[in-house]
Image (tube, rainbow, N blue to C red):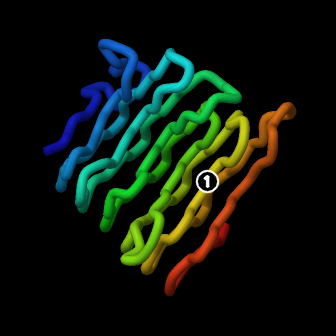
Amino acid sequence: VTFQSTTGNPDSVKLSPSANNFVVNFQNASYISFRNMTFNQPTVAYDGLVFSGSTSSYDTIYNCKITLPIQTNTSYCVNSTGAYINNIVLRKNIITGGYFGMYFYNTTTPYVGKNCVIDSNTLQNQYYYQIYCYYNSVNFKFRNNTINVNGTSGSGYVYCYYPDSAYEFGN
């Protein structure tokens, strides 16, 4: 299933939560694509895109804007905490604000993030880390991304803890 802007312009279709919650939750979702759309989370301390449940696979976010306020409270533009995500692609997106830009976290093996591609995105104005990876991945690719650090950031850049096999970083 593909959701997309008919104009090809991410600003022409904007999704926001109807209540204080996430914008989109991939709850055990597979083969879902969002193209040329904006995900706007205006509320402090809530997330943008969330991958939850046991497994989400073959989902794509392409040429979208994911926006949260810059904040010192924990919030995520893209969040996968404890979910097993496989073959997820985030490509050519602009990811702005939040405490974390992308957060892929699991507490133990088996690792999350199998065969995921994070490619040609711009991560900007996060308060803490642009990408945070903990106990993940097999064949995880992070390449051709641009990171613009917020001048008041508490830390920054990329943090990878206990990566598994075939981790690829490059520009």
Q: How many marks?
A: 1
Residue 146 is situated, as x and y percent measured from the top left of the image, at: 67, 51
Picture quadrant where residue 123 is located:
top right
Picture quadrant where residue 139 is located:
bottom left
Residue at coordinates 58% horizontally, 66% vertically from top-left?
A: 143
Give whichever of 59, 81 is nearer the camera.
81
Is residue 14 visible in the rendered image? The answer is no
Residue 65 is situated, as x and y percent measured from the top left of the image, at: 48, 32
Residue topped by disc 1:
131
Residue at coordinates 38% horizontally, 57% vertically from top-left?
A: 82
Residue 128 is situated, as x and y percent measured from the top left of the image, at: 72, 42
104 with respect to 5 (left or right): right
The N terminus: image quadrant:
top left
**Which kind of residue does numbered mark 1 sit on?**
Ile
Furthest toward the front, the residue is 107
Give whichever of 15, 29 is nearer the camera.
29
Residue 40 is situated, as x and y percent measured from the top left of the image, at: 45, 22
Q: Secondary structure at mark 1?
A: strand
Residue at coordinates 61% horizontally, 61% vertically from top-left?
A: 144
> Relative to residue 167, is residue 117 depicted above or below?
above
Picture quadrant where residue 36 is located:
top left
The residue carrying pointer 1 sits among few (fewer than 14), some (14 to 19) or many (20 or more) residues within 10 Å by Cα, namely: many
> Relative to residue 49, is residue 28 depicted above or below?
below
115 with respect to 25 (left or right): right
